[in-house]
Image: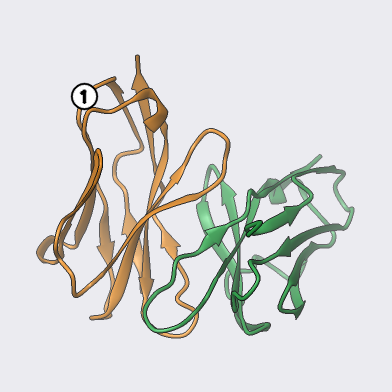
Chain colours: A orange, B green
Amino acid sequence: AQKVTQAQTEISVVEKEDVTLDCVYETRDTTYYLFWYKQPPSGELVFLIRRNSFDEQNEISGRYSWNFQKSTSSFNFTITASQVVDSAVYFCALSEAGLGQKLVFGQGTRLTINP
Amino acid sequence: DAGVIQSPRHEVTEMGQEVTLRCKPISGHNSLFWYRQTMMRGLELLIYFNNNVPIDDSGMPEDRFSAKMPNASFSTLKIQPSEPRDSAVYFCASSLQGAGANVLTFGAGSRLTVL
């Protein structure tokens, strides 16, 4: 069965600090996909990134970076030089290959960036 | 594209009343998902459709919940009779399923309050 664990319920940092959001997953499949979504205070869910299980390369997009390590079943998300606009709830999610490709979400990490 | 459109955005009703939530997926997408978000349980998948056919409804809490997708451009989630514990934000999402895992695009959500 699929499971995603985001152990950090809430994180609060001061603007310009770097912050890492942890994500640990469980799956029996060898082919799977990992995602991060952002939920700002307005409530919508915004897609950030998708990785497949065969691609362990880290990815950087501006101030955002992701570290995928199969050996520890982790897919961590780092925000560099955080800004107030980064304040949101961040969800890590897992999808196994196959019909439907439904997403199973972690519980989310509420990130607050203080000015 | 207008994105995934959900209605109503907010619904307040009394216990025992019927509630119908509506979703219009992105044109061309062939998979549709209904999720529920609560503080206690996070984001839960209720049901998903592929090519208008329900594939997995194991997340539907009980017989009071039902979902339909009569055509590729419309889906409903009905709760009858509603109970206070059904209060939550209900998200609809759609994707174009193909090889690999495809990104789910979420609607803005329908916030349901059952008094």
* Quarter of the rendering occupied by the N terminus of chain A: bottom left
When asked about the image quadrant of residue B60, the answer is bottom right
Q: Is residue B85 above or below residue A20?
A: below
When asked about the image quadrant of residue B11, the answer is top right
Q: Residue at x 65, y 71 (%)?
A: B27
* Quarter of the rendering occupied by the C terminus of chain A: top left
Q: Which residue is mark 1?
A: A17
Of B76 and A72, which appears nearest the observer?
B76
Q: Secondary structure at mark 1?
A: loop
Image x and y of residue A88, in percent:
43, 35
Image x and y of residue A44, in percent:
56, 45
Q: Residue at x 18, y 63 (%)?
A: A73
Q: Residue at x 65, y 50 (%)?
A: B109
Q: Residue at x 26, y 52 (%)?
A: A23
Q: Amino acid at mark 1?
A: Glu
Image x and y of residue B74, in percent:
76, 71
Query: What's the chain of the residue with tag 1?
Result: A
Of A78 and A27, which appears nearest the observer?
A78
Q: Is residue A40 left or right of residue B82?
A: left
